[in-house]
Amino acid sequence: MAIEVLPATAFTDIAAVLGPKRPDANVCWCLSYRIPSKLNVALRGPERGVLVQELAAQVPPPGVLAYDGDEVVGWAGVHPRADTSFARNRKIPHVDDRDVWSVWCIRVRPGHRGKGVSHHLLAGAVEFARDHGAPVIEGYPVDNHGEKVDLTMAYVGTRALFERGGFTKAATTDSVLNGFPRVLMRREL
């Protein structure tokens, strides 16, 4: 498997990973941390996909996509923290006032899990942030100590994944997901 990670500019590929099976469904589309909470709650059904399509046309786009050949197999949401809800999050601290980027969602399509795609996505998110001038990137994974994380909550990644990606723990948080504490992991670029 030769995984290539590219900026998420192809809306149809983003939709293949994040979109709903039914167009009227209110799935996340990886917007819950990317846009203000009131807007996130207000957007319904197809409106969510329309906003993602608009974000994909912006510079920088809202994240990166992983491809195995021509097939899209995964997604990572990555953007400047100042443009996300992490800029105002009370449970996840700010280490400093630098122009940090955040990676908050790593999703691998069914049938492609357990093959290392998440490692490629995290590395691609790091390169994407570096290519856009980020001095540092951080993520907020669970510290699960090797215990199984419910699949619906695994999108934040694990501390071990981030450590293997060159990140180090920079702070504890008050955030808990699926019963596991989240930690603030950081990597200098």
Image: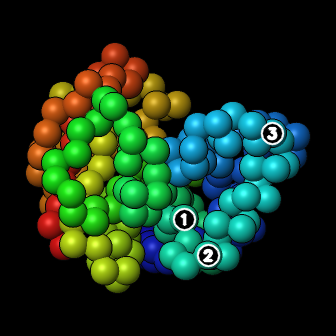
Residue 111 — which label? Answer: none
Left or right of 8, for residue 162: left
Q: Which residue is mark 3?
A: 44
Q: How many marks on residues?
A: 3
The kind of secondary structure element at disc 2 is loop
The kind of secondary structure element at disc 3 is loop
The kind of secondary structure element at disc 1 is loop
Tell me if residue 103 comes above or below residue 12 in the rendering.
Answer: above
Q: Position of residue 3 (x, y in %)?
A: 44, 72
Mark 3–mark 2 Cα distance, whole angstroms, equals 22 Å
Residue nearer the viewer, 133 or 20: 133
Q: Position of residue 86 (x, y in %)?
A: 39, 45
Do we see residue 14 in this rendering? yes
Left or right of 182, for residue 128: right
At horizontal 50% and vertical 44% (from top left) the residue drawn is 33
Q: Assign the N terminus to one quadrant of the image.
A: bottom left
Disc 3, disc 2: CB below 8 Å? no
Q: Amino acid at mark 2?
A: Gln
Q: Which residue is mark 1?
A: 62
Disc 1, disc 3: CB below 8 Å? no
Residue nearer the viewer, 176 or 110: 176
Residue nearer the viewer, 175 or 15: 175
Mark 2–mark 1 Cα distance, whole angstroms, equals 8 Å
Q: Amino acid at mark 3?
A: Arg
Disc 2, disc 1: CB below 8 Å? yes
Q: Position of residue 25 (x, y in %)?
A: 81, 37
Q: Earlier in the sequence, mark 1 or mark 3?
A: 3
Residue 58 — which label? Answer: 2
At horizontal 14% and vertical 39% (from top left) the residue drawn is 171
